[in-house]
Image (cartoon, rainbow, N blue to C red):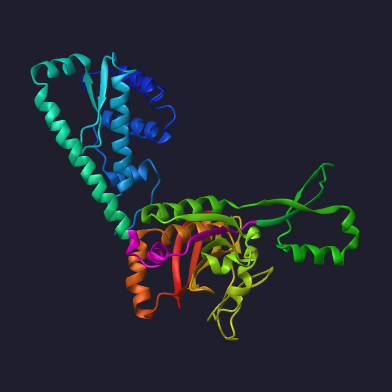
Amino acid sequence: MNFDRELINRQLKKIIESRHFNKSKISCDLLEYLVSTSLEEKSPKEFTIGIELFGKKYGEETKPDANIRVYIHNLRKKLNDYYEEEGSKDPLVFEIEKGKYNVRFISRKDIRLKKQTGYFYPFLISLLLLAGTVYFYMTSEKKEANLWKDLPVWQDFADDDKKTLLVLGDYFVFSGKLPTGNVGIYRDFSINSEVEYEHLLDKNPELVQSLTRSPLTYLSKMSAFCQNDIQKVFAKTGTEVTIKLSSDIQPTDLKEYNIIFIGNYKNMGLFENIVRELHFSFGISSGSGQYIFTSDPCAEVYAPENSDLKQTDYSLVVYMEGYNNNRYLFFLCTQDIGNISTVGQMTNPAFMEQFRNNQLKPLGQEYFKALFKVEGINKTDLSFELLKVE
């Protein structure tokens, strides 16, 4: 390195504060990371960048992460645009060569000399490289989209003529006077619907004066994470998806749409009766009641646990035929970590390919019920285990 670190850091600060970069957190974080590794004379790979910068989790069979290449491509473009305008007089230029993930620090004088000695040839090479890059990304994106469409479950949604409804399980709340003296929102874990709320008032008529049905509702942490994972898959397959809350679902939706439901065993709403009619060889329960029932009195019943040290959740994925030649996909859990982990795995191409080969093919059918055990801390999953598929 022939340049002073202080000069490099000053130029880095100027770039990330420029109008070309200041609205793109990903590009800023990625540039800072690549500058730091380049100063340490390291040349990170896609796999390393994904883990160290973006906190990704890769399995042994995970293929190269196309998103990292896209981020690098966008970063190069932003740097080029920056040096065309705001940074046209910067004494130092940051350059990321094609096919490499480290930063070269070049003086403006060297760039001018290079242009004077051979302008047309580098331009022609750049043009060919650009065309190759465009072709590569177009074909790689097409291959990735085809990869998703070839996988179980998601291929069905992509090829179906019916539109898809992504339903997020929201929680029932009511309002009343808080201990502070103000009016606020209450959430009772045993009251998950209008009917259960009315039963509460019937048994405790004195509460009529202090409690009222609230028009508000709320979603848990898992809704944001799981919705993001699902929408990424649908973007790759080119399939449209509409989002709705479980409290807003109408009976007509059950036959007009393909439905993906993500929620808690307690806030299934209209889907509760559908799930209860299914046959299970196991049960799921907790101290507040039974969630999944089985007709076998000797069957194992799984009980989620929650302590200061560890959370254990038993999440269920049900893929089944609907009422009108449509299809339902349910992600159910008792705690956020269950669905966050399960949806994350089921939207991972490597896992789904393994799931198809090892689980679905032996079953000889497309529909299934899969039970998972997820353990974690503070709603962060640390372990994931597929217990059974039927």
> Which x, y percent locates residue 207?
87, 57
Instruction: Kindly identify the residue that appears in the image at 88 percent across and 57 percent down.
Output: 208
Q: Is residue 78 left or right of residue 95?
A: right
Is residue 52 or residue 202 the one in the foreground?
202
Q: Quadrant of residue 355?
A: bottom left
Q: Quadrant of residue 143?
A: bottom left
Q: Is residue 95 above or below residue 389?
A: above
Is residue 166 or residue 317 the one in the foreground?
166
> Which x, y percent locates residue 248?
64, 58
Can residue 158 be seen at all in this image of the molecule?
Answer: yes
Q: Is residue 97 left or right of residue 380?
A: left
Image quarter of the N terminus: top left
Q: Is residue 154 above or below residue 184?
A: below
Asked if the magenta segment contains residue 305, the reply would be no
Asked if the magenta segment contains residue 150, the reply would be yes
Instruction: Kindly identify the residue that appears in the image at 10 percent across and 24 percent down.
Output: 120
> Which x, y percent locates residue 322?
52, 73
Is residue 313 or residue 342 the one in the foreground?
342
> Which x, y percent locates residue 86?
34, 18
The magenta stretch is 148-170
Q: Is residue 307 above or below residue 314?
A: above
Q: Is residue 51 left or right of residue 388?
A: left
Q: Quadrant of residue 41?
A: top left
What is the count of numbered marks?
0
Image quarter of the C terminus: bottom left
Q: Is residue 234 above or below residue 53?
A: below
Instruction: Kindly identify the residue that appears in the image at 78 percent across and 62 percent down.
Output: 197
Can residue 292 be seen at all in this image of the molecule?
Answer: no
